[in-house]
């Protein structure tokens, strides 16, 4: 069985489109997106009388036609941002009201995800190509029900799934980050969540851990050391492990065949922990490149027979 | 939540999300660029060769011309950094824009193999700028001479490799902390040199030089003796000035040995790229580069005033002709320290200036380890190359791939005298890698139009012409000029057969590695061509 695993596309529409085409491109039997589906930023487009106005990377653009507007919105979406068309009054209100920004963000995230799932319906031939998604620490909880309701995408968070004889368990929660995001928990709580999932697995020799947080100190979790202002220290030359000790302990204890991770975008790496192959394909969603791992699983030998990290 | 605004109007709303880091500080960037274009170590080292090789060339003019040209490289690299802001630099940019094979060959040669040669060069710098002057100052000229012997050079090369290897093994965390202090400490020591040269007269220097040379080396009337020896050898130099331009331009490829590296460290930036990123990246590298130029010009003018330009070049010419005045390398900062007749002061000054060496030597194999890891994850190298030991986190196999060849090449460097002349090979091979990255910059708007359109770098235009690709063209032109000179002019010691074989072997090795990897992986059912193949969007 061939699996394509990608992660952390953070609202990049071009990466989502590539993900939907990845099964055909890599001749994969199954595609998995390992969390952090939603974007981090929203770009306001101000509707004025007869035209629109937007500032992209410091440059203010005047948009005179609907087709031009569509092009700009596509550019914004492809970068992983959400375009939000607002009136001048709305923009002023958003500028002064943090709660209103939060609400608008949520609205844009949900509607964008709805659109994405509609696209998936066509591309994945109505569920003929299995596609699995789960949340990541940056994803709001409201997306769970939206994905659950899709007819062609399976929501994996907190579940055991049978993949033609292999068991997949998924968890989007991570150890705490400096950004205080949605699905974060202390290590002991993470360990409890993992143990609950692990108890569902019938045969660890055929198990795949799909945990958003990478295992601590494995090279899959190297992020720039930051100062108190979240600025990279020492010119960004110093990296430090920021993964989860609970995830690492669980892998070492249960020894699944494979564990796939994300979360730390710059830490594209592979590490063997005993018999487990742990992989973080990393993410460069901002460049419109879909990084991923093409994994061939040998059903008889219960092992990863081939793998390749790709920049699709 | 955070908001970016232009004149009070919100233009971007950011929510709390992982990885929203700010770019590293411009001050850090300036320090890195300044340490990379390391005048105190690389610059001074190169001057010993450049002056005698091109006696009619004018240093200050050539350094200004070199820095203007390298400024275009800074613009081109700033464009790449903000467009594809990834650790990995040239390897990532070239593989992404030009393809996996080209990316691997240029990165492996420019950031891995050629560092095997930089190891003995750094070793020799450690010998001539630290061990030789220290032993001499401490009253053991014979001990200093030992460091000029073949075994002495080899031992110091091994010490250098060991220092760099240990620092790679320990990780950058501790080292990065001391790097800044090394920079500031070295700067203070350099300031002391400047003050000494400023407040003392030429006559005072001549007298001090004669006194210390007699005391340490037993050479009588050494200042006049140096000039006489150089004149006897037929060497004559021009006064410091600004022309003629022809011979001065020939100094430019030599100056690249220290001035070509302001872009060395700036590859890590945040994901949410704003309009200010390009300016910040550019400002850090540009300021670092021109700070170096300023330091060099001030130093050279003071050399002319106090030491005497002709005398400085005479010292260099004697070393160039393998007859150094005191048997050891003519370290100008040691001679400046002789203005104070106090051994402790002289030792402290040498150690203070050595901080710029120790603050940079730890990065010697850093790029190599990154390239080796990236190539292993791309399945070009065996998986083991990226393995890190469980207990001590030491990248054991990649260290072998860096240290053993470097030690081997150090032996060749130490025991085969003519090989030491191929110093500029170390610059040439990296310049080739830069050239390919400059080509990548130029074709980026056509190869990756969406990526380019989304980049803050695409905004910068002059008379409607995009600045970054234009800077890429100028970079290509000046690197081609350098390459043509290196390959055609015997004075750089690059274009002889052995040197060309040495560099050719590196490229052949990289190509063979890549082709073998493609074949082996294909037999394993893995298509390496897929690594960088873009998935269709529609």
Image (cartoon, coloured by chain):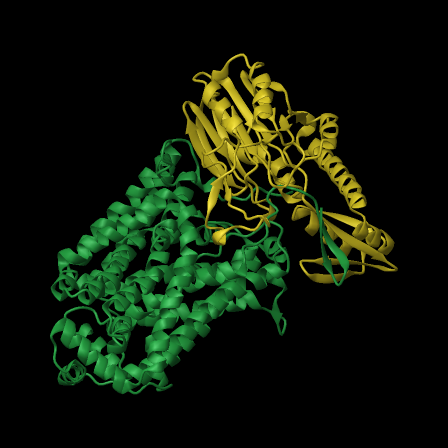
Chain colours: A yellow, B green
For the question of whether residue B326 can be seen, the reply is no
Q: How many marks?
A: 0
Q: Nearer the viewer, residue B231 or B193?
A: B193
Residue drawn where x is 33% and y is 65% of the image: B353
Residue drawn where x is 64% and y is 44% of the image: A14
Residue B7 position by quadrant: bottom right
Q: Where residue B484 sits: x, y (%)?
A: 33, 70
Q: Nearer the viewer, residue B12 or B331?
A: B331
Looking at this view, name the residue that lies furthest to the top.
A202
Q: In this view, does B71 lie to the left or right of B147?
A: right
Residue A169 position by quadrant: top right
Q: Where residue B370 sits: x, y (%)?
A: 41, 46
Tell me: residue B405, above or below residue B500.
above
Residue drawn where x is 36% and y is 49% of the image: B368
Q: In this view, does B331 lie to the left or right of A296?
A: left
Q: Nearer the viewer, residue A261 or B454?
A: A261
Q: Where residue A235 sits: x, y (%)?
A: 49, 54
Q: Where residue A281 sits: x, y (%)?
A: 51, 37
Q: Nearer the viewer, residue A252 or A123?
A: A252
Tell me: residue B257, above or below residue A162.
below
For the question of whether residue B381 can be seen, the reply is yes
- Image quadrant occupied by the C terminus of chain A: top right
Tell me: residue B97, above or below residue A175.
below
């Amino acid at each position: 069985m061939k699996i394509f695993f990608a992660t952390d596309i953070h609202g990049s529409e071009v990466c989502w489109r590539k993900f939907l085409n990845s099964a055909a491109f890599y001749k994969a039997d199954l595609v998995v997106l390992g969390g952090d589906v939603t974007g981090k930023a929203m770009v306001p487009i101000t509707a004025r009388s007869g035209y629109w106005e937007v500032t992209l990377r410091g440059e203010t653009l005047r948009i005179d036609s609907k087709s031009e507007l569509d092009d700009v919105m596509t550019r914004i979406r492809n970068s992983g941002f959400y375009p939000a068309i607002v009136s001048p009054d709305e923009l002023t209100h958003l500028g002064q009201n943090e709660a209103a920004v939060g609400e608008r963000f949520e609205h844009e995230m949900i509607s964008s995800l709805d659109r994405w799932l509609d696209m998936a319906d066509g591309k994945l031939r109505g569920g003929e190509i299995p596609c699995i998604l789960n949340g990541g620490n940056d994803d709001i909880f409201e997306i769970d029900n939206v994905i659950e309701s899709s007819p062609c995408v399976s929501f994996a968070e907190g579940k055991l799934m049978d993949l033609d004889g292999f068991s997949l368990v998924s968890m989007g929660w991570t150890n705490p980050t400096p950004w205080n995001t949605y699905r974060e928990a202390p290590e002991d709580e993470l360990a409890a969540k993992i143990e609950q999932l692990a108890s569902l697995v019938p045969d660890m020799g055929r198990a795949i851990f799909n945990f958003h947080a990478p295992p601590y100190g494995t090279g899959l979790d190297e992020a720039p050391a930051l100062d108190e202002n979240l600025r990279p220290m020492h010119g960004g030359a110093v990296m430090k492990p920021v993964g989860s000790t609970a995830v690492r302990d669980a892998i070492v204890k249960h020894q699944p065949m494979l564990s796939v991770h994300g979360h730390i975008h710059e830490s594209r790496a592979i590490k063997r922990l005993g018999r487990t192959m742990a992989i973080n394909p990393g993410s460069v969603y901002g460049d419109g490149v879909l990084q991923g791992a093409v994994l061939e699983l040998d059903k008889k030998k219960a092992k990863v027979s081939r793998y390749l990290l790709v920049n699709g | 939540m955070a908001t970016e605004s232009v004149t009070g109007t919100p233009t971007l709303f950011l929510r709390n999300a992982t990885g929203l880091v700010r770019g590293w500080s411009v001050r850090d960037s300036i320090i890195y660029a300044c340490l990379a274009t390391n005048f105190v170590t690389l610059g001074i080292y190169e001057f010993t060769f450049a002056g005698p090789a091109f006696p009619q060339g004018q240093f200050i003019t050539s350094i200004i011309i070199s820095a203007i040209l390298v400024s275009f490289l800074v613009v081109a690299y700033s464009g790449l950094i903000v467009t594809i802001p990834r650790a990995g630099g040239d390897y990532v940019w070239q593989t992404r824009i030009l393809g996996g094979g080209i990316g691997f060959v240029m990165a492996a040669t420019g950031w891995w193999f050629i560092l095997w040669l930089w190891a003995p060069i750094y070793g020799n710098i450690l010998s001539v700028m630290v061990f030789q002057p220290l032993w001499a100052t401490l009253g053991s000229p014979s001990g200093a001479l030992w460091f000029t012997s073949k075994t002495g050079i080899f031992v110091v090369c091994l010490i250098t490799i060991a220092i760099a290897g240990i620092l790679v093994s320990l990780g950058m965390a501790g080292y990065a902390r001391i790097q800044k202090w090394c920079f500031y400490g070295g700067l203070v020591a350099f300031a002391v040199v400047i003050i000494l040269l400023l407040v003392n007269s030429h006559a005072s220097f001549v007298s001090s030089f004669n006194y210390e040379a007699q005391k340490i080396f037993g050479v009588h009337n050494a200042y006049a003796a140096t000039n006489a020896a150089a004149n006897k050898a037929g060497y004559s130099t021009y006064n410091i000035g600004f022309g003629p331009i022809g011979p001065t331009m020939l100094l430019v490829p030599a100056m690249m040995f220290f001035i070509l590296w302001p872009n060395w460290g700036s590859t890590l930036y945040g994901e949410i790229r704003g309009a200010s990123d390009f300016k910040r990246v550019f400002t850090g590298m540009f300021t670092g580069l021109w700070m170096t130029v300023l330091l060099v010009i001030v130093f050279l003018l003071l050399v002319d005033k106090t030491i005497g330009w002709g005398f400085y070049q005479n010292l260099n010419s004697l070393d160039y002709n393998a007859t150094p005045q005191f048997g050891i390398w003519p370290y100008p900062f040691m001679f400046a320290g002789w203005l104070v007749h106090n051994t402790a002061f002289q030792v402290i000054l040498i150690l203070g200036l050595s901080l710029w060496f120790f603050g940079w030597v730890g990065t010697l194999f850093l790029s190599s380890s990154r390239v080796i890891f990236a190539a292993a994850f791309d399945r070009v190298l065996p998986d083991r190359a990226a393995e890190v030991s469980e207990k001590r986190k030491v990248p054991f196999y990649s260290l072998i791939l860096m240290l053993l060849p470097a030690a081997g090449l150090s032996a060749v460097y130490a025991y085969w005298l003519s090989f030491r002349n191929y110093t500029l090979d170390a610059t040439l091979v990296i310049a080739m890698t830069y050239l390919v990255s400059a080509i990548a910059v130029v074709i980026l708007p056509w190869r990756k139009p969406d990526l380019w359109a989304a980049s803050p770098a695409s905004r910068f235009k002059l008379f409607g012409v995009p600045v970054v690709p234009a800077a890429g063209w100028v970079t290509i032109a000046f690197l081609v000029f350098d390459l043509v000179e290196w390959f055609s002019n015997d004075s750089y010691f690059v274009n002889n057969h052995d040197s060309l074989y040495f560099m050719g072997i590196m490229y052949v090795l990289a190509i063979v590695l890549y082709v073998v990897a493609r074949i082996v992986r294909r037999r394993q059912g893995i298509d390496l061509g897929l690594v960088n193949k873009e998935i269709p969007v529609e």
